[in-house]
Amino acid sequence: MNSAAASQRVESLPPQVGAGCLLLILGTVPSVRSLELRQSYGHPNNLFWPFMGEMFDAGPDLPYAERIARLQRRGIGLWDVLACCERSGSLDSAIIRASEIANDIPRLLELQPTIRAIALNGGKAQQAFGRHVAPRLTGELRARITLFDLPSTSPANAAIPRALKRQRWEQLNAWLVDHAHA
């Protein structure tokens, strides 16, 4: 079966970045469910919102707009590495690499000079960032930004136990505590 024949064009949601953003969390590109809901990390089995609830009081029990507002008050923004790509289904592994077009993250970093860290949610986000974004960062931006490579919160990433994922994601909370008043 030719997976390219079943692929569809997928587009990123708009960035959710407030004034004073310190930390930008980047996924790869939204899942089918996220696109249907127009909400980042919309799949009910994705651990992203449970983790945000445990660390930042922005859990899945709250309305989406309130979760975003709570993250923004803590200095956290959300976006995706890819602006668009072709993919069949929701898995990052189904993304057709030649179709990848990155969001203009260097421009966002220039417009939001308070951003000091980027957290990459999963291996595919890390790879796409390395291919498409990192080469476009100026020396000043590279020096300013701390990168966190984190395990994917996707339900497809079942090889890493939840407790280990959560422990790795906890780095963000520690970093924010250290940098919120710097």
Image (cartoon, rainbow, N blue to C red):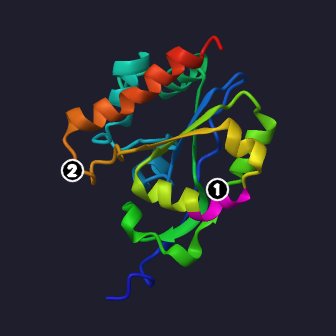
Instruction: Tell me the amino acid under the disc marked 2.
Output: Ala
Mark 1 residue crowding within 10 angstroms, few (<14) / some (14–19) / many (20+): some
Res. 21 image quadrant:
top right
Task: Work out how far the residue at label 1 is from the one at label 2, CA to CA, in angstroms.
Answer: 28 Å
Is any part of residue 168 visible from this angle?
yes
Q: Is residue 73 magenta?
A: no
How many numbered markers are drawn?
A: 2
Secondary structure, magenta segment, majority class: helix
Instruction: Tell me the amino acid under the disc marked 1.
Output: Ala
Residue farthest to the bottom, as pictured: 1
Mark toward the viewer: 1 or 2: 1
User: Where the N terminus falls, by quadrant?
Assistant: bottom left
Q: Nearer the viewer, residue 145 or 97?
A: 145
Residue named by callout 1? 134
Give, as a single range, the part of the protein colored magenta: 131-136
Mark 2 residue crowding within 10 angstroms, few (<14) / some (14–19) / many (20+): few
User: Where the C terminus falls, by quadrant?
Assistant: top right
Q: Nearer the viewer, residue 166 or 181?
A: 181
Q: Position of residue 25 (x, y in %)?
A: 53, 38
Q: Which mark is residue 158?
A: 2
Task: Name the residue: 48% across, 52% down.
Answer: 30
Task: Name the residue: 40% across, 62% down.
Answer: 92
Task: Name the residue: 73% across, 43% down.
Answer: 141
- Against 53, is 44 above or below? below
